[in-house]
Image (cartoon, helix red, strand yellow):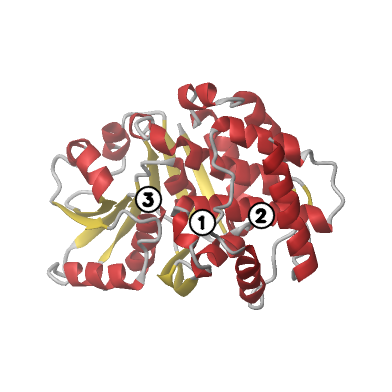
């Protein structure tokens, strides 16, 4: 199956439901030197499969760090040094086959290096797929400090179900991206997720592929609104003492939840947030905040970060409203409500 995806004047062709080699064979330009950016874990798992998809091409691999935000200044510098040995007279394919940081790094550098070529993405997870759909490709100094930005979408995205199905340990993280889209831009879709994935058993046996087209259309109209929701609350964990006790993905997940709870404090809503939290716990999400984390310091960091950027607000679940600044009282009430609920369930 194929979908055409457009953000502003940028267009991407998404291919899925076919074997990877056949999908690529249909559009592969002749005599392209292929440069693949990946993470060590995906290189170890899928080196042979990706090599076989380009049987007649010269291929070079660059292996980035496994961390979520590997699209940082140091990694960019090392990759530019790696590219220094390639002649500018050739045409290239820059392919991101890795996590979100790899997608960001590849998309940024394909627009800025002197080598001529296209940008493709073969996402090993749905979170990488959604990262590819956002046109802003970033380089950061730290996860909370974005330095450089280029607008870029891949020419092609190839979804291979056999690759994605092997990422069972990341299914909770992938589902988080679907839940985030439902909270921000589609309450009916959020309810559909609840019905399709009521427990861990269904989560680990069912596929997300049936939702590809719907998610693609949500991102086509609201990609930035979806992905920005919760980011300031996420970044504040990196600035807070003992924030390292949370993994990068847990910082992102809890950032989403805490912005939601703050949002519910400033808007009247009929959303049954306690039922929502029970569902998340049943799925296996670790929803508790570390005891060693200073809540007062964390909230202070959120308030500091929002000085440069207002917080996104949902007027209702699934509907975006006007952005605004938070104040200390609503933030404290939000965290207190959050902790009260998780202590009960």
> Where does residue 243 sit, x and y in percent of width and height?
49, 61
Eye-nearest disc, 1 or 2 = 2
- Separation of disc 2 and disc 3 at Cα? 24 Å
The 10 Å Cα crowd at callout 3, few under 14, some 14 to 19, many 20 or more, is many
Question: Is the C-beta separation of discs 1 and 2 under 8 Å?
Answer: no
Eye-nearest disc, 2 or 3 = 2
The 10 Å Cα crowd at callout 2, few under 14, some 14 to 19, many 20 or more, is some
In the image, what residue occupies the spot 36% across and 41% down? 124
Name the residue tied to disc 3: 99
Toward the right, the furthest residue is: 268
In the image, what residue occupies the spot 30% across and 72% down? 74
> Where does residue 85 sit, x and y in percent of width and height?
12, 69
- Separation of disc 3 and disc 1 at Cα? 14 Å
Name the residue tied to disc 2: 258
Name the residue tied to disc 1: 134
Nearer the observer, 228 or 110? 228
> Where does residue 324 sit, x and y in percent of width and height?
76, 68
**Nearer the N terminus, badge 3 or badge 1?**
3
Eye-nearest disc, 3 or 1 = 3
| Image quadrant in which the N terminus is located | top left
> Where does residue 250 sit, x and y in percent of width and height?
50, 50
| Image quadrant in which the C terminus is located | top right
- Separation of disc 1 and disc 2 at Cα? 23 Å
Left or right of 307 in this view: 263: right
Nearer the observer, 220 or 28? 220
**Nearer the N terminus, badge 1 or badge 2?**
1
Is 166 rendered above or below residue 223? Answer: above
In the image, what residue occupies the spot 56% across and 54% down? 291
């Amino acid at each position: 199956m194929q979908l055409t995806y457009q953000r502003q004047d940028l267009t991407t062709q998404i291919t899925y439901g076919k074997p990877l080699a056949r999908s690529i064979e249909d559009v592969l330009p002749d005599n392209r030197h292929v440069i693949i950016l990946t993470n060590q874990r995906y290189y170890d798992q899928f080196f042979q499969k990706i090599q076989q998809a380009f049987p007649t091409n010269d291929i070079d691999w660059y292996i980035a760090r496994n961390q979520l935000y590997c699209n940082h200044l140091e990694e960019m510098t090392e990759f530019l040094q790696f590219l220094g040995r390639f002649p500018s007279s050739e045409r290239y394919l820059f392919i991101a086959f890795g996590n979100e940081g790899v997608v960001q790094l590849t998309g940024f550098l394909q627009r800025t290096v002197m080598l001529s070529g296209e940008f493709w993405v073969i996402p090993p997870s749905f979170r990488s797929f959604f990262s590819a759909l956002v046109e802003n490709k970033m380089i950061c100094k730290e996860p909370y400090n974005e330095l450089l930005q280029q607008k870029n979408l891949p020419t092609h995205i190839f979804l291979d179900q056999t690759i994605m199905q092997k990422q069972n340990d990341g299914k909770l993280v992938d589902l988080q991206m679907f839940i985030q889209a439902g909270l921000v831009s589609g309450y009916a879709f959020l309810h559909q997720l609840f019905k399709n994935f009521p427990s861990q058993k269904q989560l680990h046996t069912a596929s997300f592929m049936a939702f590809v087209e719907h998610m693609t259309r949500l991102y086509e109209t609201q990609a930035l609104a979806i992905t920005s929701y919760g980011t300031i609350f996420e970044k504040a964990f990196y600035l807070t003492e003992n924030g390292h006790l949370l993994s990068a993905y847990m910082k992102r997940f809890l950032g989403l939840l805490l912005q939601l709870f703050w949002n519910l404090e400033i808007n009247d809503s009929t959303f049954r947030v306690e039922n929502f939290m029970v569902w998340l716990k049943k799925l296996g999400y670790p929803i508790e905040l570390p005891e060693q984390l200073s809540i007062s310091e964390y909230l202070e960091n959120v308030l500091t970060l929002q000085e440069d950027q207002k917080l996104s607000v949902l007027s209702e679940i699934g509907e975006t409203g006007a952005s605004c600044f938070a104040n200390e009282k609503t933030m404290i009430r939000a965290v207190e409500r959050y902790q009260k609920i998780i202590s009960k369930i």
